[in-house]
Amino acid sequence: MLKIAAAFGVCKIVSPSFQKPLSLGITFSPQTQRKKERETMVALCVSRSDDVVIKSLNDKRLYRVIELENGLCALLVHDPEIYPDGVPDESGTVEYSENDVGEEEDDDDDDDDEEEEDDEEGEGEGEEEENSEGEEEKGKGGASSQTKKAAAAMCVAMGSFSDPAEAQGLAHFLEHMLFMGSEEFPDENEYDSYLSKHGGSSNAYTEAEHTCYHFEVKREFLKGALRRFSQFFVSPLMKSEAMEREVLAVDSEFNQVLQNDACRLQQLQCHTSGPGHPFNRFSWGNKKSLVDAMEKGLNLREHILKLYRDYYHGGLMKLVVIGGEPLDVLESWVTELFPKVRKGPQTKPKFQVEGPIWKAGLLYRLEAVKDVNILDLTWTLPCLHQEYLKKSEDYLAHLLGHEGKGSLHQLLKARGLATSLSAGVGDEGMHRSSLAYIFGMSIHLTDYGLEKIFDIIGFVYQYLKLLREVPPQQWIFKELQDIGNMEFRFAEEQPQDDYAAELAENLLVFPAENVIYCDYVYKIWDEKAIKRLLQFFTPENMRIDVVSKPSVKSEDLQCEPWFGSSYIEEAIPPSLIEIWRDPPEVDVSLHMPSKNEFVPSDFSIRADNLDHDPVNPSFPRCIIDEPLMKFWYKLDSTFKVPRANTYFRIYLKEGYTSVKSFLMTELFILLLKDELNEIIYQASVAKLETSISLVSDKLELKVYGFNEKLPALLSKVLMIAKSFLPSDGRFKVIKEDLERNLKNANMKPLSHSSYLRLQVLCKSFYDVEEKQCVLSDLSLADLNAFIPELRSQLYIEALCHGNLFQEEAINLSNIIRNNLSVQPLPVNMRHEEHVICLPPSANLVRDVNVKNKSETNSVVELYFQIEPEVGLDSIKLKALADLFDEIVQEPLFNQLRTKEQLGYVVECSPRVTYRINGFCFVVQSSKYNPVYLLGRIENFINGLEELLGGLDDASFENYKSGLMAKLLEKDHSLQYETNRLWNQITDKRYMFDSSLKEAEKLKSIHKSDVINWFRTYLHQSSPKCRRLTIRLWGCNIDSKEVETRPDSEQVITDITAFKVSSEYYPSLC
């Protein structure tokens, strides 16, 4: 919704024709060659600075800002951790001699001809939209991970605001088209093939005023990827036949969000903005907006070329390149590959605006798809791009969105009006444009609150009156400043391509020196600026949107044309506006927040003083193993930040023995979170986070962030948890919220199909409809009688990882022991999950209709069950599944998505369900029925043996190398490493170096092994080929129209009877 994202790996690109130089038999020494390259760089760069970017003292990367003669500004980032042992000799780097036409390197010996790329190579990792409980996907990172990927991003200062009125969505369509081939690399598959073969991936998204393209790749292949990437911006082909197909991809992408309430609201806000205003756009684009334009005589190709010519030039481009090579080498690559980008002025598009974005005094009631009650208030502020050092809007967001004592949130919650509230200027482009900043407040209402919307808005204006009466508080700004500086100083790394995209976006708006610091800095305290902003928070400048299920049909119903959403426009009574403008009083419960007790001041690093803990192994150690508790510990000596992550799984007594007990356990945890909210919120502001969730019969508690105040927070949380009993008022609100969540479950087709697959596979699986029936009869008395029994016996398994000495970790275990002093829960009373063992040659099918009667998307999920994850062969089986996925992903996408245009989602991936291995193919389509989709998947699978057999040795080794790079990729941050270690603990695997072991096993795997794996588990002639197909039928297709079924197909009509008669694997976790 917030970013219009192209499909993962959709876009396929190529680069300009670089002629290979004639060999004249003249050899330069390396020193002479580098001098010549340096002279070339000087000639092509009009400016260069190595010391301009403000960075944290803990940031070991080097930054250089250059500008080319064509106006393109590039930020070069040397990351020393990409080559921790130093950059290898260029003559030994595979990239320089393979897959690149005419590359001139320091070593003259690297002049071999380009090796032709195979058209059918794999795309990067494909992941589900929502990962289901008990499942994991192809992981990355390992205990001995040593490498990081390289990455790049390009942001172009043109987005959907520049769409011509007669071809809306054109900027988004242009983003798609740049991936469809270029003059030097005309094959649409080339870019994806190159990246996937070398452990990479790519993506792109279109915003209101910019479009961003980014990729990551194995470190040695950065230049080859840059060469292909550069051609997006030099010589894209924009072929007519590709345009005809890619219009369908844009249309499929739109169909993914057609039933999304947030996207529908955003489009309603666009639709009801002033005529001619840049907001008044349909930025997604679809078949109707683009094809209809052609049918009306518009030459779409000419318009898309014009858009490209007008805006895709150096003056509007910001490039970021992150590599392990020295800055001089990175600069030489940029000056070699990007000078052919067309020259242009550094003048961004300007938009003429007259009058406000929206009419004043109106309320819009949007009919929701899901069962939700949301009140959205928005105020239009001036553009604040130049005010980023003051962050006055963030000061106001901090107060209006606060959840502590005296806050608006607490008042609405205490009165039973709302369950959550958030406030601030959104990150998406429409909310932070050059035209205006849009300050939003989103309030999730109870059913009672839905009836009291005007009262709630009245309380909002009472709080705003308080903010006007109490002068802006410098101590609050100082608190935010301290937290911002703390975060900047000890920022956790993110994936390289995300970081590149973030920096490129920031370069479009902020000075180069603050390209990193701009997100954290609170530099200038300006009381007057805050007061000026407060003047915009008036009823006359407010837009009101209510998203809910309508209680009655209205004759005044209108229709938003693109999404087909129904809405009502109402005038707000002038008397109400008058009261809101100046409320007669401020409720006594509203006041300014108190100082935050969780802001840390001790940032000492424990690993710098290992005298206290001389043993520091690479893996977690079990330091406590008792009937009540098992405690794992690892001191961090890698990232050396003052953070710690403490994760706990608390097994509860009889929390999963029946639907009723499971629901009461869930209600207890939801009510506990509600009770803890004020404490948890205050700590989260200080970057000490708490997560509380339910996993079958286990309460999962995570407390993580800056470590100084972590013990105090854990003590507060457990002190409340050990004796808490809910009140009647909160029970009603939380039960209502849970009922609503159950009604909204499985509204997304992809999550619904995963749910249906797990419902078949898992022995203990409580159906949503069954939960709804039982929940309706649950009372507070039932729950309060159940809670003491639930807490009477426990078993706790925990991981403490980060900036804590062992004695500090033991102190945390004592906090648990002192607060949860109960009897241990025996092993035989802990819930175990069992997964069905599909019989030999199984070919099971389950047909279900979509839950949302307006959802046109159908889904086919074809699941192959492999083997349990046990024994010496388990690592090899996982390696084979991951390698098969690596090879097959892109050909699958290319055939079923790019060529056949079945739908926007086309993917495959390994599935590990409670440690039972499997493999899945998934297609979602709004155009074709599930039977047809399944036939196309099967047709593709039938051709895979030929595809695998046709892989040459070099390509196969490249796939192996690319997968190994993913497995051995360095953890991005402490939390990435903690999560990886925690997965091993919760799955009871305890193989903390599993990725390293898999990478080692890959070395001995041959192409014949992959082919044999495919024949054994995916080829239907094999008895070990065991299939489960989920066919989810869209609303516009009748599953009864299915033609004669194959004799081998067993349809599951009674899921309960089927599971009772089935066999199950022993529990592994």
Image (spheres, grey):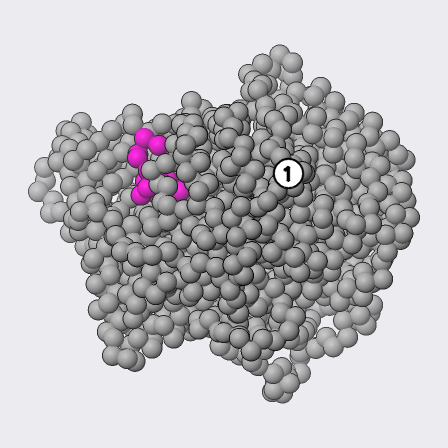
In this orientation, does residue 176 appear? no
Residue beneath disc 1: 590
Q: Is residue 510 magenta?
A: yes
Residue 778 image position (x, y, % from top left)? 85, 58
The residue furthest top is 611
Q: Residue 736 or 632: which is nearer the viewer?
A: 736
Q: Which residue is drawn at the image coordinates 20% and 58% (left, top)?
A: 309
Q: Which residue is drawn at the image coordinates 11% and 44% (left, top)?
A: 23
420 with respect to 104 (left or right)? right
Image position of 784 with respect to 391: above or below: below
508 with respect to 1046 (left or right)? left
In this orientation, does residue 532 appear? yes
Kind of residue indicated by mark 1:
Leu
What count of labels does the image hold?
1
Q: Is residue 823 magenta?
A: no
Q: Which residues are magenta?
A: 499-514
Residue 784 image position (x, y, % from top left)? 88, 47
Q: Which residue is drawn at the image coordinates 57% and 61% (left, top)?
A: 546
Q: Residue 907 or 252: which is nearer the viewer?
A: 252
Q: Residue 861 or 1015: which is nearer the viewer?
A: 861
